[in-house]
Image (tube, rainbow, N blue to C red):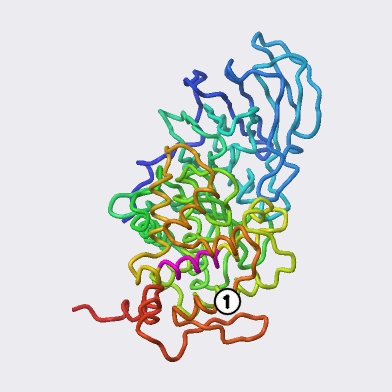
Amino acid sequence: MSKSFQSFYLASIVVILIAATSVLGQEIEATITIDSKKPELIKVEGRFSTEALNRNLSFLQSVAGTGDLAKRISDLQLFDAAGNVVSFKKLSDGEYLGETEFERWTYAIDITPQKNRSAAAHVSWFVNNTGILMLADLLPRLANKSKRSAKLSFKTPADHELAIRPSSFVLSSEVRRDEGHFDVSDIEDAVFYFGSGWEGVFSIGRPNPAGVYLSCCAWNFGAPDPSDMASDIYLSYERSFGSRSIGPPIVAIAKFPVQTGFGEWEAETRGNSVTIISSDMPFKTQSQQRLHEQLRHELFHLWIPNGVNLTGNYDWFYEGFALYQSLKLAVSLNRIRFEDFLDTLSRAHTIDSAQSQRTSLIQASTNRFSGSNTQVYARGMLVAFLTDLAMLEQSKGKRSVEDLLKDLYLKHRKPTPPTDGNTSVIEMLKTRANATSIVEKYVTGTDKIEWANELAAAGIEDSDPGPLTALRVKEKLKGGQKAMLDKLGYNNWRKLSAPSK
């Protein structure tokens, strides 16, 4: 089922050199040099296009709760168009002001893994001949530019200098025009996986591959299980959204570059690149289940938010609804029981109900990495569940939250003009799902979720009158309740186990 990676983006790390010619419209040309003596200290040299010249040089300060990124920069030098050195002042970490306009720059940046383990899925790092380069934290930022394009090259040492195998490579979903040439359309989305530690490359999607899967290190789940999982999940979302994701995805999974206990994981889907950083589980079945969970959540993001042109902080929607859709997909693929589905919703409700200082989901999304991350996920998922119940009941089972997500994706799919995410989502929730009350109470409002009536319509009840929510299916069900439960996946195991005729 899998086929050789040669038909995709593989290139030997020992031969990658990018020509210096520029491409129309690209604001930055850059070369990343890896030194065999200290590969975690990479050298970056580059230039701005004449349209992007200015006196300021600025770098990303923080991402996903990890700060002080600009402190990794050293040995900065600036040059004008004639090659003369331009003096500069350091205003703060990552902020520099040249005495005159400059065109070229060089600096070193230390990509030793951050002590904060969660940073590994969001910040560049290199260790044990395995690395991930997130261009957003490596290349300079441009004033008043939300999107930066670049022409990128790598200069790397010979295999024997790093004691790596000839099969080492650099892999990216960015466009490779010819031998070693990467044209980056948006630096914010660009991810490169490099080094000899990446192995086990498989295609994703059947019968026509939609992307690739690669892994680092030995795992309990083994192979080719990962590529099969990714294929099944990707194709499920493809059917649900009505089209493939924009651009072929790369799914990469690696172990944490710092010491981490069992069961931890962190992930990010940036552009078309799905990066999962995880510790293993003690047993094969646990490892397989955890990987399936990771893939269900992250592959969803290839469509929303990465495939739509919605702007702003509407994290509550794309994270909360991703969690909910991941749960429903797990039930439909018989990965979890319906009781597990209800148990996850129960825990989310317990967490959200315990919040002493409540804020709207709009505000929580703005403060996501300053203490509101749990609220974004927990209440966001509950809003998705309530929306699903409302749509199923109003349409007598003909429309569900999957239809809402598909409508949103097709309406705002790139390259449609950008619109505000919160405005667009809320409008669709009100008009397509008749969920005005849900929005006003739990999205823009701060009410505690009271859902007894909505649960009753689906034949579900809370069996625990105390602070811990414990959802269960009622013992006696009416016809309408049975129909809604069936749409939620309650009887899925019976359908999968039924003998074919």
Magenta segment includes 387: yes
Residue 348 placement, left or right of 21: right
Magenta segment includes 243: no
Residue that mark 1 sits on: 346
Closer to the camera in the image, 247 or 471: 471
Q: Main secondary structure of the magenta part?
A: helix
Q: Residues within 10 Å of mark 1 (few under 14, many from 20)?
A: many
What segment carries the magenta color?
Answer: 381-391
Closer to the camera in the image, 206 or 4: 206
User: Is 166 drawn above or below residue 463 in the view shown?
Assistant: above
Closer to the camera in the image, 202 or 64: 64
Closer to the camera in the image, 118 or 453: 453
Residue 225 point in image, percent of width and height: 41, 63
Residue at the top extreme, as displayed: 82
Residue 360 placement, left or right of 148: right
Residue 253 point in image, percent of width and height: 52, 54
Identified at 57% across, 87% down, the residue is 463
